[in-house]
Structures are given as structure tokens and as C-alpha cells.
Amino acid sequence: MKNSFFNLLGFWQPLRASVMLSVALLFSACAGPMASDAGELGIPVMKPVPLCAETLPAWREYILPNGDDLAYASIPWHVTFGEGMDAARAEGKPLLMWAMNGHPLGCT
């Protein structure tokens, strides 16, 4: 224990127990329930469906977007803020401007 990582970095010595406990709690919280526990927890267990010629139509129907998934395409979007302001003013409607910083999926 004399040459351990925490002993080499002397300032970590008082925090060693709390750091080790925090790491252990983090890993146990991230692990969550195991997949084998799903049935016992009341979570429906789905069997894997292979991708082959017989199951291709079902996979295609599952993967391709349906009408509800494409509803956003029916909105008359405007490319510039000026076009949107002009259209909102002409129709007497409010304007929603969505502005954000970062990755659109929140992956920053």
C-alpha cells in the first residue's frame, strides 16, 4: 500500500475513502438492473427477431416512418427569420423562433 496511486499523490490521502465510495456508488448506479432480472421486475422480455427474407417486411414496416412521424413536414417552415416575420405579420399570428446552442440532440 506504500506505493499506491493515492499515496503517491499525497493530497488525495484524506479523500481516499470518499473517492472510492463515490466511484463504487457511481458504477452500481450506472449498472442498474441486469437484463436477466427483467422478468422478475415485471418488464416484458422481447425475443430477438432475426433479419432475414421472411422478417424483412415486418422490419421495414417497423423502421420506416409513418404518418405521425412525418407530421412535422406538413408545417410551412421558413428558412429565414425575416420570411417568418413577414408571414406571421400577414396572417396575424405569433412567431415562434427556436434558437439553441450546441448539438441538436443534446450530445455536447
Image (cartoon, rainbow, N blue to C red):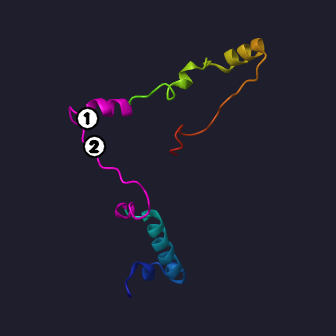
- As drawn, 96 above or below 26: above
Callouts 1 and 2 close, C-beta under 8 Å? yes
Residue at 76%, 23% in the rendered image = 94
Residue at 39%, 60% in the rendered image = 38
**Residue carrying label 1:** 55
Residue 3's disc is none
Q: Position of residue 63 (x, y in %)?
A: 37, 33
Q: Give how far apart the Cα atoms at labels 1 and 2 are.
A: 8 Å
Q: Position of residue 83 (x, y in %)?
A: 67, 15
Magenta stretch, residue numbers: 35-63
For the stretch drawn in magenta, the main secondary structure is: loop
Position of the N terminus, as image quadrant, is bottom left
Q: Is residue 62 magenta?
A: yes
Disc 1 residue type (three-letter): Thr
Classify mark 2: helix, strand or loop. loop
Residue 49's disc is 2
**What is the tally of numbered marks visible in this picture?**
2
Q: Work out whether residue 52 or residue 85 is closer to the camera in this orientation and state it.
A: 52
